Image: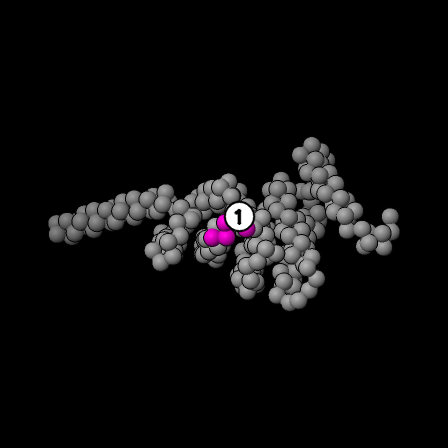
């Protein structure tokens, strides 16, 4: 099949890509030789390069939304996000999900700077909702211990995406049924569950910052999503217990010093 044929047939390219992805998924789950092959460092290096390339492609295509380009631009962004979503499915089987999590975390600030500059219309809304869906996969991997990253990265991930996700949910709900793309109940529960699990893995001081941002959204903006009350109650209990233990230890030390 010639390159020109592929260039002139985007539908064919999509079909070939879907077929290839399905074949990869099958081989990763059923073929023992493939599972041995992907353990080779050379193969992993190629996959890591692909992860870097797809994140760079996403940033480039997102940036193109800020200038006047053909109307199909948002579809190219969505295709890239669907590719990243697919990676979230196969990379854990290759023990490379951490590479995607790190790349996504590093790129999150730049992704959101671009996304927030885009006006919320029917074209861009789908992109923003899909960004949240992909981020949900990243939050899930970190929150449920599929991927272990430093607490600084976990905190960064939450603090960057929490305000964006909360504002987008509010805007989408305000539009009612006008737009095709929604943040439905299943997605919201998925995001909440991942965030609750993730925030509970943070150091106490970082938890306090996240809860401060969350309560600010409730108090100033009246936004109740995501509901982190379960994690907040656990944090309060742990904080009180830690304070009580500290007071008891100080009292014991004071008694010992008096005896001496």
| Observer able to see residue 73 | yes
Q: Name the residue located 69 percent from the left edge and 42 percent from the top edge.
A: 38
Q: Which residue is mark 1?
A: 177
Q: Is residue 258 above or below residue 29?
A: below
Pinpoint residue 115: horizontal percent, then vertical percent: 56, 60
Most extreme residue toward the left is: 259
Q: Residue at x 70, y 51 (%)?
A: 46
Closer-to-camera residue (38/6): 6
Instruction: Determine if the magenta segment contains residue 66.
Output: no
Answer with the quarter of the image where residue 49 lies.
bottom right
Confirm whether the magenta stretch covers residue 177: yes
Q: Position of residue 72 (x, y in %)?
A: 69, 57
Q: At x 48% / y 50%, what residue is drawn?
A: 173
Query: What span is in magenta?
Result: 174-178
Of residues 158 and 128, which is closer to you in this image? 128
Can residue 3 be seen here? The reply is no
Which residue is pictured at 58% across the width and 48% down the height? 180
Q: Residues within 10 Å of mark 1 (few under 14, many from 20)?
A: few
Q: Nearer the viewer, residue 246 or 218?
A: 218
Q: Is residue 74 above or below residue 144?
A: below
Q: Position of residue 127 (x, y in %)?
A: 59, 54
State how many labels appear: 1
Query: Please, which residue is most extreme toward the right here?
Result: 2
Give the structural element (helix, strand or loop) at label 1: loop
The x, y position of residue 57, in whole percent, is: 66, 58
């Amino acid at each position: 099949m010639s390159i020109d044929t592929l260039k002139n047939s985007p539908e064919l390219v999509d079909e070939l890509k879907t077929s290839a992805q399905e074949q990869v998924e099958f081989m990763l789950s059923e073929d023992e030789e493939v599972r041995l092959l992907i353990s080779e460092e050379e193969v992993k290096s190629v996959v890591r390069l692909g992860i870097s390339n797809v994140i760079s492609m996403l940033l480039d295509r997102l940036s193109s939304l800020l200038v006047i380009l053909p109307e199909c631009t948002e579809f190219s962004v969505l295709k890239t996000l669907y590719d990243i979503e697919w990676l979230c499915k196969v990379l854990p089987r290759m023990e490379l999900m951490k590479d995607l999590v790190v790349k996504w975390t590093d790129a999150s600030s730049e992704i959101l700077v671009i996304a927030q500059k885009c006006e919320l219309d029917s074209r861009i809304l789908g992109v923003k909702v899909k960004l949240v869906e992909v981020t949900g996969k990243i939050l899930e991997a970190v929150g449920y211990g599929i991927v272990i990253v430093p607490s600084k990265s976990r905190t960064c991930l939450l603090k960057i995406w929490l305000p964006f996700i909360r504002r987008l949910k509010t805007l989408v709900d305000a539009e009612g049924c006008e737009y095709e793309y929604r943040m439905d109940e299943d997605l919201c529960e998925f995001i909440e569950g991942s965030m609750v699990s993730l925030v509970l893995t943070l150091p106490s001081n970082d938890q306090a910052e996240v809860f401060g941002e969350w309560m600010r959204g409730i108090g100033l903006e009246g936004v109740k999503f995501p509901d982190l009350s379960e994690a907040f109650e656990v944090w309060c209990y742990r904080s009180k217990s830690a304070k009580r233990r500290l007071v008891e230890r100080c009292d014991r030390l004071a008694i010992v010093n008096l005896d001496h």
